[in-house]
Image (cartoon, rainbow, N blue to C red):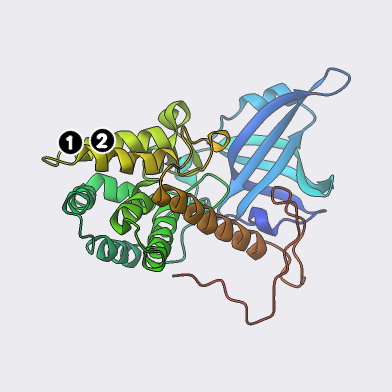
Amino acid sequence: MAEAKAKFAADIAAGDGVEDVFVLADKSMAHKRDGNPYLNLTLADKSGQIKGVVWDDVARIAAVAQTGDFVRVSAQAGEYRGALQLVVKHMIAVPVASVAPEDFLATTSRNVDQMFDRLKAVTDTMSSKPLHALMHALWGDPELVRQFKRAPAAKMMHHAYIGGLLEHTLSMVLLADKIASHYGGLDRDLLLAGAVLHDMGKTRELSYGHSLDYTDEGRLLSHIIIGVELVNEKIQSIPDFPPEQAALLKHMIVSHHGAREFGSPEPPKTIEAVLLNYIDEIDSRVNAIREFIAADDPDASWTSYHRLLARHFFKGGPEASNDSP
């Protein structure tokens, strides 16, 4: 019988004693100045992650579980350099059958089937016959659709929960549709198709059984390469798909991170690709900030310091809303 968690990571405070089950999201061995080893841990559940450290009995504890396993830890919560940290005294592996999966994977708060139906309704309005046929080929692949409805959009930064990829994709498609109506001379269908396909490779880049991590294929190829392969596969099933349109669409995928230093093999070289990069940045950044605000002290007017974005965020008045399309 599955055992419910007593306390989630987000509810732990400095001074708490912790005796609970987590996913071992990461572990790494390091050494103190005197040469003795210690173990850094990242423990996770659906509420988020918490760092841990093992000072004693390091070799034995390091050997009890692998990354991605469920573990029961006995620990004391404290603060280190302004961040919460668990000092782990004991850790054992826990069988998958003994835990409740819903405690460990966060899920979108929105209705997945309704989001998917709305996305299909927009793609059905494409006037380009080849791109309309490509969307039909995508949505006619039951296994791909099943994965697309479940996949997260990232491991940590934004939409990092079950259904996050669909939520992110729908939001981007709706933004792209609005932007395409604002600027004249754009290829609306190409922009929409790029928004649908830009992160489709994450269905295979990420694993999301009971924890979020990268697959071997994802680490070796990245979602960009996987996405291009997926598009190639679907295009081959469509007779007389225009080669130039195929190249422009694949360029949308390979350039959507905006620059080589951010993982794109090529920077955006069409107006549609430039817009896709900015639409992706807008949607991912807004979601990440909202998630950060939601996890912060609800009684404070300002958030704690966001290290990656290097700022505090003002939370606004009581009328502020996190609703999105």
Name above or below for residue 98 compared with residue 188. above
Residue 17 horizontal side relative to residue 276, left or right:
right
Residue at horizontal 66%, vertical 57%? 10
Instruction: Indicate left or right for 66 with 50 as reference.
Output: left
Q: Residues within 10 Å of mark 1 (few under 14, many from 20)?
A: few
Report crowding for label 2: few under 14, some 14 to 19, many 20 or more residues within 10 A (C-alpha). some
- The amino acid sitting under disc 1 is Gln
Q: Considering depth in this image, is 274 or 145 the residue closer to the camera?
A: 274
Toward the left, the furthest residue is: 239
Residue in the picture at 83% in, 48% down: 79
Check disc 2 and report its element: helix, strand or loop.
helix
The residue at the point 31 percent across, 33 percent down is 229
Residue 186 placement (x, y as % from top left): 35, 57
In terms of depth relative to the viewer, which is nearer, 223 or 86?
223
Q: CA distance from mark 2 to mark 1?
A: 6 Å
Question: Does the CB distance between marks 2 and 1 fall below 8 Å?
Answer: yes
Q: Nearer the viewer, residue 13 or 234?
A: 234
Residue at (35% x, 49% y) in the render: 194
Name the mark on residue 232. Answer: 2
Q: Which mark is residue 236?
A: 1
User: How far from the left and from the top, in percent, is residue 230?
Assistant: 29, 37
Decide if residue 184 is in sight here: yes
**Label 1: element kind:** loop
What is the three-letter code of the residue carrying label 2? Asn
User: Which quadrant would the C terminus be assigned to in this image?
Assistant: bottom left
When the figure is inspected, residue 239 is found, relative to residue 195, above or below; the finding is above
Taking depth in this image into account, of 79 and 110 the one nearest to the observer is 110
Pinpoint residue 208: horizontal percent, then vertical percent: 44, 44
**Marking on residue 22:** none
